[in-house]
Image (tube, helix red, strand yellow):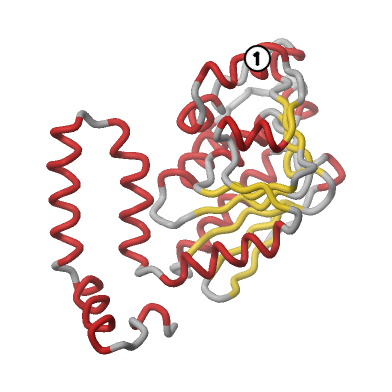
């Protein structure tokens, strides 16, 4: 699809590979534009999931500092929109990380629903060491992590490992075989009805923001609408008839 973000679709899953290892997959204007192109293509193909992977030994090093220091205007809108599309869109997203992650790269990673990393992966919020702050990326990160658990990494810029990232909730899976773990997760996602998976993704973000009474009311409405939906009817019929539902046969 592009020079620095590769796209392929397999089993109905869109795979977007950051392929700019010469600058450690930094968030250049070109990379972000091609990332949006890839998400556009995934949406056009009605992809069942989106996997963000990478080449080289770094998932993403964060902002392209050469571009940021070239004297031109700084516009973070493409980065903000990319994170919003990954986190807020209906399609489940997975970050497949087999290298180091730094600064804005952690924000990109944290915007995905599931984050699979190797046990050797390291992370660092290096922003304070160059005179800035982890500002924009704090939005997806603090949606996952208690602020007290990330205060020291934010304030000091010190690196931390995969075990610490898992303990604080920044990543969901630590493994020695990222590809195999991602494959297993995709098998599970493809077992579910697309509408049900999308609704579940949305409620994971919605319910924690609500008071209990509102949460129960909204979730009752959602549950009843799904049971009354075509996919709900198909799922219950397939259970009774001991057959696979239609979305598993695609």
Residue nearer the viewer, 231 or 165: 165
Residue nearer the viewer, 82 or 37: 82
- Please state if 151 lies on the left or on the right of 224 as rendered: right
Residue for point 53% across, 56% down: 39
Residue for point 67% across, 13% down: 132
Q: Quadrant of residue 6?
A: bottom right
- Residue topped by disc 1: 152
Residue for point 60% across, 74% down: 10
- Please state if 129 lies on the left or on the right of 10 as rendered: right
Where disc 1 sits, the SS reads helix
The answer to whether residue 189 is above or below residue 74 is below
Q: For the N terminus, which image quadrant?
A: bottom right
Question: Residue 153: horizontal and vertical position, in percent?
Answer: 67, 19
Residue nearer the viewer, 62 or 183: 183
Q: For the C terminus, which image quadrant?
A: bottom left
Question: Residue 58: horizontal and vertical position, in percent?
Answer: 79, 43
Question: Residue 138: horizontal and vertical position, in percent?
Answer: 53, 24
Q: Residues within 10 Å of mark 1 (few under 14, many from 20)?
A: few
Q: Residue furthest right?
A: 22
The answer to whether residue 8 is above or below residue 83 is below
Residue for point 62% across, 37% down: 166
Residue nearer the viewer, 182 or 45: 182
Count the numbered circles shown. Answer: 1
Q: Quadrant of residue 3?
A: bottom right
The answer to whether residue 248 is above or below residue 92 is below
- Please state if 178 lies on the left or on the right of 45 as rendered: right
Q: Quadrant of residue 129?
A: top right
Question: Residue 149: horizontal and vertical position, in percent?
Answer: 57, 21
């Amino acid at each position: 699809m592009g020079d620095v973000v590769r796209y392929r679709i397999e089993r109905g899953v869109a795979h977007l590979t950051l392929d700019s290892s010469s600058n450690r997959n930094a968030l250049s204007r070109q990379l972000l534009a091609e990332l949006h192109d890839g998400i556009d293509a995934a949406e056009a193909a009605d992809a069942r999931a989106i996997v963000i992977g990478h080449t080289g030994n770094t998932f993403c090093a964060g902002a392209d500092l050469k571009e940021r220091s070239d004297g031109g205007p700084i516009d973070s809108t493409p980065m903000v929109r990319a994170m919003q599309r990954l986190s807020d869109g209906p399609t489940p997203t997975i970050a497949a990380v087999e290298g180091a992650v730094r600064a804005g790269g952690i924000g990109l990673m944290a915007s995905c629903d599931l984050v699979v990393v190797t046990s050797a992966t390291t992370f660092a919020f290096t922003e304070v060491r160059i005179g800035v702050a982890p500002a924009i990326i704090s939005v997806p990160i603090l949606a996952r992590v208690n602020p007290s658990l990330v205060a020291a990494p934010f304030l000091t810029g010190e690196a931390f490992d995969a075990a610490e990232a898992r303990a604080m909730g920044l990543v969901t899976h630590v493994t020695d075989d990222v590809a195999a773990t991602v494959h297993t997760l995709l098998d599970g996602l493809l077992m579910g009805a697309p509408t049900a998976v999308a609704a579940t993704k949305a409620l994971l973000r919605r319910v924690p923001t609500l008071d209990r009474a509102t949460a129960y009311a909204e979730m009752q409405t959602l549950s009843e609408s799904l049971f009354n939906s075509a996919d709900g009817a198909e799922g219950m019929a397939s259970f009774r008839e001991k057959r696979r539902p239609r979305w598993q046969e695609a």
